[in-house]
Image (spheres, grey):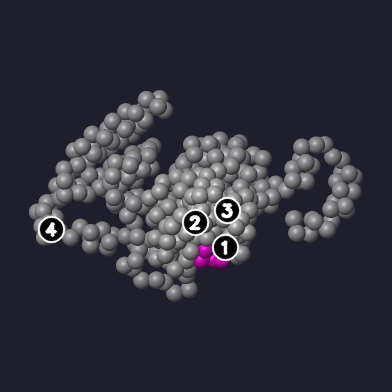
Amino acid sequence: MIVMKKNYYEMEVSSKNASELFKNFSFELGVEAIEEKENSFIIRDEEDLQNLEFAFIEFQKALQKKFNTKIDLQISKSIKENADWIEKYQKSVEPIEVGKFYVRPSWKESKKDLIDIIIDPAIAFGSGHHESTNMCLKLIDKYAKDGAAALDVGCGSGILSIALKKIGLKVAACDTDIQAVDASIKNAQKNGVKIDKIWNGSIADANLALRNMDGEILSENLNENKNFNQSFNKEFDFVIANIITDVILILQNELKNSVKSGGILIISGILEKYKNKILNVFSDMNNLEILQNGEWVSFVFKKVLKWIKIIKTIKITAVEIIFLTKILSAHLSFLL
């Protein structure tokens, strides 16, 4: 019989310029659940959190050394009576409405005429409350087309993959964190949808182990999986990546190459200070829209069609453009 202790420990962590890094670090340290607030997050445990506090401080020092800048970190600790804080926490988590989507925890009711997405905040990865995830849902609502093939890079909780499936897209998803892959599979099941293919790794790792919705490995080699090859090519109509700037920059070529000509690429999870850098790196694509919520920015890019890219890179007179347009008139009707 497990006896609940009289008191529990609570630690609130906030950072003005590295909140997401500290949040992710807490999961790496083995924290299983946090409560996300507007500018901070709370960790609760029946054991003293002193060692965790020490780890955060050391991590702060390491970040400051790596980036050669001051990293803000505020930690407050308290001891509280061990009432049913899980129930209190559940009451504090409210559903959110984003476009035609209604994101809610399982203990809340669905809302009529909206697409229901059930995400229970735990090892969060994405519950729709964070600005970047919220903007992604808005952009999915606006740009994703029924029947298209989509790729969710850094799928986290699976919230974006679930949203894409619920509006009729074929979805492939990947994440370098195996816990995120497992969370996506479980959350998709909870929502009554199936992510068509999901793997642990990045875009280039699609030829590694693929998993079905039961978490079973389908194939050690993508080439052996005929169903995957028939459903998805190496290029997708719609690609979305809600991950930090450093990873976006590392994956820039893979992201561009994964989008079909004329396809859509959505990039999110970008702090405002990196806005121009992202625009510069993806300048070979058409920037259709930029959304901003607080300090977070999301981008919508469209991959330039190959023949349009050629026109942009060489000097062509107005007469030549008219002549070229006539030649390609059969194609222009659906490209413009």
Q: Residue 237, relative to residue 168: is it above or below?
A: above
Which residue type does callout 3 highlight? Answer: Glu
Of pointers 4 and 1, the one earlier in the residue sequence: 4
Residue 149 screen position, x and y as percent: 60, 58
- The residue that label 2 is drawn on is 218
Q: Are marks 4 and 1 in contact (CB under 8 Å)?
A: no
Q: Say which quadrant the N terminus sits in.
A: bottom left
The residues bearing labels 1 and 3 have C-alpha atoms spaced at a distance of: 23 Å
Give, as a single range, the part of the protein colored magenta. 163-169
What percent of the width, then of the height, locates residue 35? 29, 52
- Look at discs 2 and 4 and give the one toward the viewer: 2
Q: Residue tagged by mark 4?
A: 2
How far apart are the alpha carbons under marks 4 and 1?
A: 46 Å
Look at label 4 and name its amino acid. Answer: Ile
Task: Residue type at mark 2: give it.
Answer: Leu
The residue at 38%/42% (across/down) is: 20
Marks 2 and 1, how far apart in space?
21 Å
Which three-letter amino acid code belongs to the residue tagged 1? Answer: Leu
Identify the mark nearer the N-term, 2 or 4: 4
Q: Crowding near pointer 4: few (<14 within 10 Å), some, many (20+)?
A: few
Q: Is residue 151 magenta?
A: no
Q: Residue at x 18, y 38 (%)?
A: 50
Q: CA distance from mark 2 to mark 3?
A: 9 Å
| Residue 239 rendering spot, x and y as whole percentages | 57, 51
Residue linked to disc 1:
169
Nearer to us of marks 4 and 1 is 4
The residue singled out by tag 3 in the image is: 224
Q: Is 164 covered by the magenta stretch? A: yes
Q: Nearer the viewer, mark 4 or mark 3?
A: 3
Label whose residue precedes the other's in the sequence (4 or 3): 4
Of labels 1 and 3, earlier in sequence is 1
